[in-house]
Image (cartoon, rainbow, N blue to C red):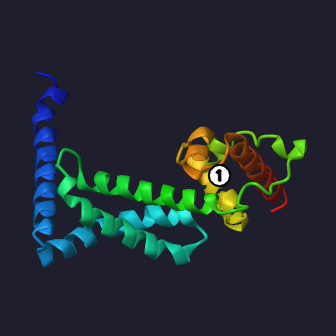
Amino acid sequence: MSVSGSQRPDVQQAANSTDESDANLAAAVRRKDRKATAEFVSRFADGIYAYVHSRLLPRRDLVDDLVQEVFLAAWENLQQYRGTSPLQAWLMGIARHKVEDHYRARLRAPGAIDDLDRDSEVLASFPDFESLLEQEQVRKNTWRVMSGLPEQYRLALIWRYWEKASARDMAAKTGKTEKAIERLLARARAEFRERWNHG
């Protein structure tokens, strides 16, 4: 028998143990067990906070409210958690939806997209923007530049390149045209490039 084969039962047992632990915790929270509720928050709050914080920078004033919304939504929908995946993954799914709702609301605002310049120079794409966000060595400078961008530019870039939403999805979820979203992204990339080159 191979080494990996002999380790499989242990890995499976650990996964089952985690699933069972998560299911037990969720059941206790549903019963309104205060100790379980406190454990639920303490176990997952840091991860949720870090996720939301990284996607709302520099709007730190909005992070706490959005994290609270994530936990409220989790408590309201905990009966839907079946224990088939880790509780943290289930909560992160809720956090992703809440962040996306925030992007959608901000970009739906009147004038958030429609008043953008349409000159062709702005429509040039910024090469390798996606890889730029992923490179650890430039992350700090990337977020310095991102923090200084107008909110609609920052949110559009994060939603498109970090959250991997397509322009079509963004348009459908904001009620804007795909062309308007593409213009917004092009303008945002151009502004990012300008600030990056002269930062």
- Residue at 15 percent of width and 68 percent of height: 29
**Residue drawn at (31%, 51%) of the image:** 89
Is residue 63 left or right of 131 when viewed as pictured? Answer: left
Corner quadrant of residue 105: bottom right
Which residue is tagged 1?
157
What residue is at 69 percent from the left and 62 percent from the top? Answer: 110
Q: Is residue 70 left or right of residue 136?
A: left
Q: Position of residue 22 (x, y in %)?
A: 16, 56
Residue 51 appears in the picture as rendered: yes
Quadrant holding the N terminus? top left
Indicate left or right for 37 with 112 as reference. left
Instruction: Return the residue nearer the eye: 16 or 10.
Output: 16
In the rendered image, the vertical position of residue 32 relative to residue 26, given as above or below: below
**Which residue does the image show at 10% across and 43% down from the upper left?**
13
The answer to which quarter of the image holds residue 172 is top right
Q: Is residue 134 visible?
A: no
Total numbered labels? 1
- The amino acid type of the residue labelled 1 equals Leu
Compared with residue 68, is residue 138 higher up or lower down, i.e. above or below? above
Along the line of sight, which residue is nearer the eye, 72 or 127? 72
Q: Nearer the viewer, residue 91 or 194?
A: 91
Image-quadrant location for residue 61: bottom right
Q: Residues within 10 Å of mark 1 (few under 14, many from 20)?
A: many
Task: Return the x and y of residue 69 as percentages of the image width and height.
Answer: 38, 69
Secondary structure at badge 1 equals: helix
Q: Is residue 23 left or right of residue 47?
A: left
Q: Residue furthest top?
A: 1
Return the x and y of residue 11 as percentages of the image width and height.
16, 40
